[in-house]
């Protein structure tokens, strides 16, 4: 069942729909859940958790072998951490978790063509899975999107539409186009969020069903924070872990609407005026899922944190020294590990999982400008 996040109206999962009649976003609600025993003989992709993903029949699954990325023990700024290397997914970002589930549902529904708007990674991911499913995709991106991402979108055969102005102008252009076709938005689709729950499942399964104390993640539109929160809640409800970890959601100081709303204990996220940031993937002035992001932070006893541009770049270098190349957006989360420690929220005994969301090759132009070549 698809349930409205605001008015609680319910819709069957059998008809194409991306939002409630009242205009709010929908959530996938289901009692179905995998068991620990069932996982023992399944392949190492996120489809091992299929019962929880809302896709009933395997012939509709559109997969590139995504998920089950490494979770490696390491250390950042003197803090022991578990790095979730989600930049190693098939298109180079964690978005593949959402795309594989959303596109599988669109295939099940028989949707022939879609539009999507993205700061780049979701667009590239959806373009890849749509192509594999035989669905025609039109992807709207801000004009300033990194060249690596736009080249990727075009290579997958999607129509690329570059929109001048802000990220919000891009959404408006995509919505106008969506009146003629289906709006397959990663910021709206309940199936995209369902796919992101698998990050929570994996982090626990890969630790022998032990939940970490903290999960540190960048936040922009909020699907990742919401997916993690719902995923851990599923595991608690199924008795697989005793309690959910606290969530640390990280934004660039240059665009931090969630941080400001969280500090004021608001129940929704007002828009902010944003400045330029290297973390283009999370530069969203007013997230659609503001209410749910804040609820996830409050209920998980989580925190919102900001990091400066200097800290973001320093974190890209700190990871590169370990042989890990992530884009600046993905470096926001590891950069914030220092703040958690400085605030006394973590110590040497804390289990801290850090999600690395996108590979550095996505933003080659930004790195070349940063390196001065
Ligand atoms: Zn509604």
Image (cartoon, helix red, strand yellow):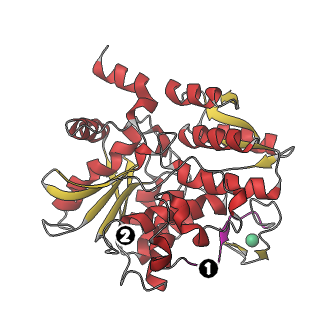
Q: Residue furthest right?
A: 180
Q: Is residue 178 magenta?
A: no
**At 70% from the left edge and 32% from the top edge, which residue is drawn?**
158
Q: Position of residue 17 (x, y in %)?
A: 79, 61
In the displayed structure, does residue 359 sit left or right of residue 307? right
Label 2 close to label 1 by CB (< 8 Å): no
Q: Measured along the vertical axis of the image, is residue 25 above or below residue 153?
A: below
Residue hosting label 2:
204
Residue 70's label in the rendered image is: none
Quadrant in the picture for the N terminus: bottom right
Residue 32's label in the rendered image is: 1
Q: Measured along the vertical axis of the image, is residue 316 above or below residue 152?
A: below
**At 32% from the left edge and 13% from the top edge, which residue is drawn?**
373
Dominant SS type (magenta): loop
- Residue 58, located in which quarter of the rendered image? bottom right
| Numbered range of the magenta stretch | 22-33
Confirm or reject: label 2 Cβ below 8 Å from ligand 1. Answer: no
Q: Measured along the vertical axis of the image, is residue 275 above or below residue 347?
A: above
């Amino acid at each position: 069942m698809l349930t409205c996040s605001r008015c609680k109206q319910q819709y069957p999962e059998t008809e194409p729909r991306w939002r409630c009649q009242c205009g709010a976003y929908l959530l996938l609600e289901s009692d179905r859940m995998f068991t620990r025993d069932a996982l023992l003989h399944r392949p190492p992709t996120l489809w091992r958790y299929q019962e929880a993903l809302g896709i009933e029949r395997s012939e509709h699954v559109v997969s590139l072998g995504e998920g089950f990325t490494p979770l490696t023990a390491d250390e950042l700024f003197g803090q022991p951490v578990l790095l979730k290397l989600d930049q190693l997914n098939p298109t180079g970002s964690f978005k593949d978790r959402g795309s594989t589930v959303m596109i599988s549902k669109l295939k099940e529904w028989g949707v022939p063509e879609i539009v999507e708007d993205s700061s780049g990674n979701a667009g590239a991911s959806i373009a890849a899975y749509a192509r594999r499913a035989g669905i025609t995709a039109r992807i709207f991106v801000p004009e300033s999107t990194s060249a690596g991402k736009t080249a990727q979108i075009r290579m997958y055969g999607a129509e690329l539409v570059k929109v001048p102005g802000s990220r919000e102008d891009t959404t408006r252009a995509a919505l106008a186009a969506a009146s003629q076709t289906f709006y397959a938005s990663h910021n709206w689709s309940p199936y995209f969020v369902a796919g992101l729950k698998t990050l929570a499942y994996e982090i626990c399964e890969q630790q022998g069903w032990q939940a970490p104390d903290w999960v540190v993640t960048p936040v922009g539109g909020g699907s990742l924070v919401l997916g993690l929160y719902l995923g851990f809640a599923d595991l608690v409800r199924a008795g697989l872990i005793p309690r959910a970890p606290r969530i640390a959601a990280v934004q660039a100081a240059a665009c931090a609407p969630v941080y400001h709303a969280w500090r004021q204990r608001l129940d929704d996220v007002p828009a902010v005026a944003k400045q330029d940031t290297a973390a283009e993937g999370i530069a969203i002035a007013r997230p659609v899922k503001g209410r749910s992001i804040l609820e996830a932070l409050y209920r998980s006893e989580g925190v919102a944190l900001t990091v400066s541009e200097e800290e973001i770049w320093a974190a890209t270098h700190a990871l590169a020294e370990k042989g890990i190349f992530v884009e600046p957006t993905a470096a926001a989360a590891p950069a914030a590990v220092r703040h958690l420690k400085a605030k006394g929220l973590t110590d040497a005994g804390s289990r801290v999982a850090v999600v690395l969301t996108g590979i550095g090759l996505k933003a080659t132009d930004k790195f070349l400008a940063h390196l001065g070549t």
